[in-house]
Image (tube, coloured by chain):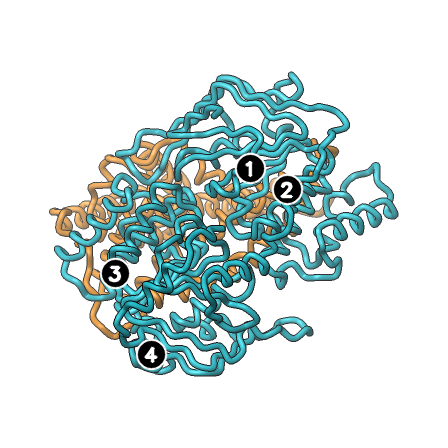
Chain colours: A cyan, B orange
Amino acid sequence: MGPSQSDSTSSLAKSRVPMPNAFCIEHLSFTYHSYVQKQCESLFENLSLQIEEGSKTLLLAPFDKGKTTMAKIMCGVCPKYFPGTLEGTIRVFGTDLATLEPWQLLSICSYVSQNPQEQFIANSVEEELAFPLESLGLGREEMRSRIDRALQHWGLDRLRTSSEQELSGGERKRVLLAVTEAIDARFWILDEAFDDLDQRWRDQLKEMIDKGNKTVLVLASRYLAEFDGLFDQVLLLDDKKVVSLPQQQLLSRFSQLCQDDLANPLASQVCTPPEVRQLVCTDLVAERRRMSTLEEASFKVQVPHFTLQSGELVTLVGPNGSGKSSFSRILCGLDGYLSGSIKFDGTSLSGKELSKKVGYLFQNPDLQIFLPTVNDELSWSLRRRRDLKQEEIRRRVAACADLFGLSLSDTPATMSYPLRKALQAAVYYLLDRPFYILDELDSALTYHTALSIIRDLRQNGAGILLITHDRQFAKRVQQRTYSIEKGRLCEL
Amino acid sequence: MTINTFVAGKGLLYRFDPRAKLLTVMLLCIWFFLPVSLVGLYTVVGLLVLVGAINTGFSHIAKTFLSILPMLLFMVLFMPFNVRDGESLITIGSFTLITAEGLEQAVRLAGRFIGITYACTLLFATTVMQEVMLALRAFHLPYKAGLVVTLAFTYIPFIAESFSQIAESHSLREAESDQGKRIIQRLKDLVPTLTSALVFALRSIPNLAMSLELRGFGSEQKRSSFKDLSSYRHPYTHTLLSCIMLVVFWVLFRVQ
C-alpha cells in the first residue's frame, strides 16, 4: 500500500476545470444469471459513476467484487456475451450505451483485459495490431506507421511475427497495450494492466497514462507503488457501489476489505520439515525456439547453480520473457534440457520422476482443476493410491478442505477466482510434494490470500519457489532471491 | 485463443502464391478420391511428405504424423472387419475375419487421410493466416465467411494445445505410485482431460466473440487490408504449374 500519497490527487481534481463526462453510469444494478439452483448474488446495486473526459481514474476493488464485469459492461459486451440482468443507464460521451454495438465503440473505448489470453484473435503480433485498424478502414501506410510505432514503443518489434502461444505473460500484456495505443481510442479501460509487466514496462505505462491526453480508467485489486500521484480521482468499489472518500480513508478501507491490515500469515509460521530434502541444478542448459519467426535466435536458459531446500521460501524475479516459466517447466520435469543436471537429494531424476517431486501451480488454475465437485478434485489423486483406505481419504480431504476454506460440495466452475486458486493449491497440498513452484500466485489474489496459501503449502515443510513481478509482495516473503535475465539465472 | 500454425522458413513453398497453394490443396483433396492405383496414391503422399520435410523440417512432419496416428490406427485396424466382400485372407473356422478387399480399402483410406492431412498442414505451415484469408477472398469468398474458415483452422489447434496443457497439468497431479501405470488407467485418465479441454473451449467462446466485436468485427464499414498478395508475382504460372502437376499424376497413376 502507498498511504504516503496524501491527498495530492484530490487537490489536483479540485483545481481542474470541470469537463463533460466521458462515462456516466447511473443507478446500475447487475446480477449474473445462474446455471445452478443457487441464485447468484448481485454484483452492483444502484451504482453510479462519473468519469470526466481527459481524467485519469483509479477504481480499486477487492477480487471478485465485479471489477472485470464493470469493464465488460462499459464496453457493451456484458450482458451480451456474459448473461445477466442489467438495470440503470450508461452514457458514453453523451450517447446511451444500450443503443450502441461493441464494434461501434472501437474508436471510442479500448479495453485491456486482466487475462491477455482471452483477447487474442489473430495469429501473430503484427496481425493482432492490424485487425482493429482494418476494421477502422485505415489506409495501408497509416496502418504501417501506427503498427511500427506501437511495436517499437512496447519493445515488440522483434516479436512481430510471433504467435500468442510463443509469448510470455508480460509480452502478451504489452501486445494488448500496443493494440490500444495503435487504435488510439479516446477512452482506455485498463483492467489490472500493471500486472504481469516488469518494472520497465510498468514505468512506461505509468508515463503513458500520466502524459497522454486520453481518458483513462484503471481497475485494480491492489494498490501498487506506481499509482502514487498518477490519478485525478481514486474510487473504491465497496458494498456493490462506487464510493469516493478522502484518499487516506479510502486506502485504509480498501486495505481492510483486502485483509491486508491483518498480520502476515507467514510471520508467525515456524517451518520445521520432518526431513531436509534438497533440489540442486548444476550447469543446466536448455534451448527454446520460436517456430513462427526466422529472425529470432533460439532462446537459451542457463542455470549455473540453483538450490532449494525443504522449508525454504525463495523468490524468482526477472523481466518479461526472461525465462522464468521456461526454467519452471524444466524444474518440474515438463520440458527437457540439453546439458547439466537436476538432482533430488543427490540423485539425478528423469522428467517423469521430477514431476512427482516438484509441484507446479500454473498461473491459470482452470488448467489444473477439472472435476464436478471440490470433493472429487481433492480425492482424485488420493483414490489412485493403493495404500490409502476410503476412510483415510475422506479424513484427509475433509481436513484439507477445512484448512483452505473450501466447501466439499461446491462446483469449481462456479466458484470465485480466489477459491479456485485455493482449490488448486489444496490439490497440491494433498499430493504432499517436497517442493512447489508458484507461478505469479499473487497476480490475481490479495496479498493476504496469497500469503495464506503459501503458509498452508509450507505446513508440511515443503520448499517453495515463488515467481513474482510484484516487489512489494516479494519483500513480504523472500528469504533468498534468484534473478533471471535473458535466460541466465543467478542468485542475488 | 488462437494458435499460429505457421512455421517460419525460406523454402520454395513459402514463395509459392497462396492462391495457387489454396487451389492445389482443394484439387489434391479431390485427386485423392479419383480412381488411382495404390502405388500412385502413395507416391503422391510420399512426394508431399518429402516437399514438407524440405520446407518445414522433418520434426514438423513427424509431429504432424504423430498427431494423426491414433485416428489413423483406429481407421486402419477396424476398416478391414467392416468389408466382407472379396477373397478371404484370414479366417477363423468358417468365419472370414479379413478380406483382400477390406485390407486394400483400409490401406487406401489411410493413404487418403495422410495425404489430405499433409496437404492442408503444408498450406497453413507455409502461409501466414492473413494471406490464406486474402487467397480465400481472391476466390470471392465473403470476408465474414473467410474469417470463420481461418478462425476455425486456428481455433481447433488452440483446443488441441489446451488439451495438451491440461494433460500436462494432470500428469503433474499424479501420485508417486502412478509411475508405470497400465494402459487401461491411461485411457481412463483421458476422460477427465477431454472433459476439461471441452469445458475450457466452451468457456472461451464468449471471450472470442467479445474480442472480435471489440476489435470492430460486425461493423458495416468497409474493411481495409494491411497486407496484399502483390509480392507474389507469378500467380498464374504457379496455378498452371499446380494444375499440370495434378493432371500428370492423374495420367500416370489412374486405374486403367
Instruction: Give the distance between the C-alpha atoms of the residues marked 2 and 4, in whole angstroms.
Output: 45 Å
Position of residue A412 in the picture relative to residue B237 (left or right): right
Q: Are marks 2 and 1 in contact (CB under 8 Å)?
A: yes
Q: Which residue is mark 1?
A: A466
> Is disc 3 on the same chain as disc 1?
yes
> Is disc 3 on the same chain as disc 2?
yes
Residue at image point 55% right, 44% down:
A362
List x then y, in percent, for residue A368: 60, 48
Nearest to N terminus: mark 1 or mark 3: 3
Q: Chain of mark 3?
A: A
Amino acid type, label 3: Ile
Front-lying residue, A199 or A322: A199
Nearest to N terminus: mark 4 or mark 1: 4
Q: Quadrant of the N terminus of chain B?
A: bottom left
Instruction: Give the distance between the C-alpha atoms of the residues marked 2 and 3, in whole angstroms.
Output: 41 Å
List x then y, in percent, for residue B169: 59, 43
Residue A454: mark in rendering: 2
Residue at image point 39% right, 30% down:
A485
Instruction: Give the distance between the C-alpha atoms of the residues marked 1 and 3, in whole angstroms.
Output: 36 Å
Q: Chain of mark 2?
A: A
Q: Which residue is mark 3?
A: A183
Q: Are marks 2 and 3 in contact (CB under 8 Å)?
A: no
Residue A100: mark in rendering: 4
Instruction: Give the distance between the C-alpha atoms of the residues marked 2 and 1, in whole angstroms.
Output: 9 Å
**Residue depth check, mark 2 versus mark 3: number of the one nearer the observer:** 2
Q: Chain of mark 1?
A: A
